[in-house]
Amino acid sequence: MKLETITVSPGERRVLLMFDPLCRASTDDRIRSYLTSSGLEPRRQYRETRDETDYEVYYFGHCYIEPHLDSLTRMAAED
C-alpha cells in the first residue's frame, strides 16, 4: 500500500491509500482489517492508473483519519 497526503486548499488535506491489486503487499490485508476494526470507511473508493499501474484507491479526509496515520504509516513501512 502507498499512502499519499494531498493539500486541497490551505487547511484542507486528503489522504489516499493506494493498493496495487496485482502486486499485493504483505501488509495490505492487515491494513484493510485495521480500517474495518477501527470503523474507518473511505469517503470514496475508486480505481486510478499511475505509471501504468492500476490502483484501488481509498480516499479519506485528513481530519477523519489523522488519529490513525501513525499506525497506518508503520504498517505500510513494514512491507
Image: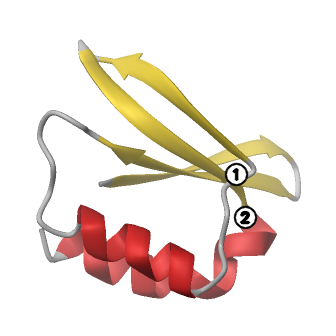
Nearer the observer, 16 or 9: 16
Visible in this render: residue 69? no
Quarter of the image where the C terminus is located: bottom left
Residue type at tag 1: Arg
Nearer the observer, 46 or 1: 46
Judge whether 71 appears above or below 10 on screen.
below
On the rendered structure, is 47 left or right of 12? left
Mark 2 sits on what residue? 62
- What percent of the width, then of the height, locates residue 63? 79, 72
On the rendered structure, is 31 left or right of 15? left
Visible in this render: residue 36? yes
| The furthest residue to the top | 52
Mark 1 sits on what residue? 14
- Looking at the image, tell me whether mark 1 or mark 2 is earlier in sequence order: 1
Give me the residue at 56% from left, 31% from top. Answer: 46
Give me the residue at 68% from left, 56% from top. Answer: 60
Residue type at tag 2: His
Q: In which image quadrant can residue 9 be found?
A: top right
Nearer the observer, 5 or 67: 67
Q: In which image quadrant can residue 53 be found?
A: top left
